[in-house]
Amino acid sequence: MKIKPSIASLITALTLFASAAGHAALSVDQSRYVFEGDKDAISIVVENAAKKTYGGQTWIENIRESDTRPSFVVTPPFFKVAGEGKQVLRVIKALEQMPENKESIYWINLQEIPPANKDGGLSIALRTKVKLLYRPASLMEGRKGAESSMTLKVTKSGTTLENTTPYIFAIAEILDGKDKPLVLNEKAHTTLAMFTPGDVLALPTGSSATQVVSVDDLGHLGKYPIKGMPKS
């Protein structure tokens, strides 16, 4: 599908958070990563766009899980990347018991360690954050098009979009019957950027919603119809 400029900028915010990311020397090869439950590890490729050697540090942090123990570890946690070179990292599960009835979400952090500035100038170290989704093996087969299984509920108090699935979505837009995006506030967009199982979003009064524009595992946009429930 053709991406509107406004949607394209929003997708950048949904999938990749970085301080001046466009000027970072170190970058990762994907805008999001999916750790499938039947895998032992996944790989991350870090690329150095600079001509000088840069150091790097990586770690993973929980976003919404109450358990603060490390769920995943990255190896090596500290490394060097030669100018215009690459470094392959491995993400390994640190906990044997993970939620198996829903997806879980984490941040992968990549911190630059710039070379010493021999001229005494200021060196800026940038940090990139991308999403890591853990998908239990039992949920892998049902992920494709799962956005269409969300529920649109109409009640006397208004209309809500509910994530009644076990999956986590990054939703860029909610479209009405005329294929036009609903006008949502910043808080609503923040909720939709990480729409987790059980989340409920109240839609603007009088609005109708028929589709969502969502980001898939590869960072591509797609349109998905959403089902409704009888009025109550």
Image: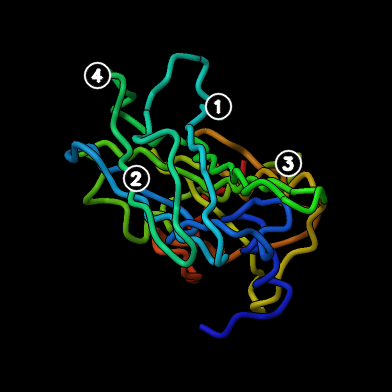
Of pointers 2 and 3, the one earlier in the residue sequence: 2
Residue, disc 4: 96
Of pointers 4 and 1, the one earlier in the residue sequence: 1
Please give the name of the residue rendered at 64% of the width and 59% of the height, measured from the top-left corner: 24
Q: Name the front one of labels 3 and 4.
A: 4
Q: In the image shown, does 158 or 15 lie closer to the viewer?
A: 15
Q: Is residue 148 above or below residue 37?
A: below
Say the numbered circle drawn on residue 130: none
Cα separation between marks 2 and 3: 52 Å
Q: Name the front one of labels 4 and 1.
A: 4
> Where in the figure is residue 15, as x and y percent of width and height?
57, 55
> Where in the figure is residue 59, as x and y percent of width and height?
48, 32
What amino acid is at disc 1?
Arg
Please give the name of the residue rendered at 56% of the width and 30% of the height, measured from the top-left corner: 63
Cα separation between marks 4 and 1: 18 Å
Residue, disc 1: 64
Mark 1, other Cα within 10 Å: few <14 / some 14–19 / many ≥20: few
78 lies left or right of 12: left
Residue, disc 2: 89
Q: Secondary structure at mark 3?
A: loop
Q: Secondary structure at mark 4?
A: loop
Please give the name of the residue rendered at 43% of the width and 58% of the height, measured from the top-left corner: 148
Of pointers 2 and 4, the one earlier in the residue sequence: 2
Mark 3, other Cα within 10 Å: few <14 / some 14–19 / many ≥20: few
Residue 162: quadrant of the picture = top right
> Where in the figure is residue 55, as x and y percent of width and height?
52, 45
What amino acid is at disc 2?
Leu
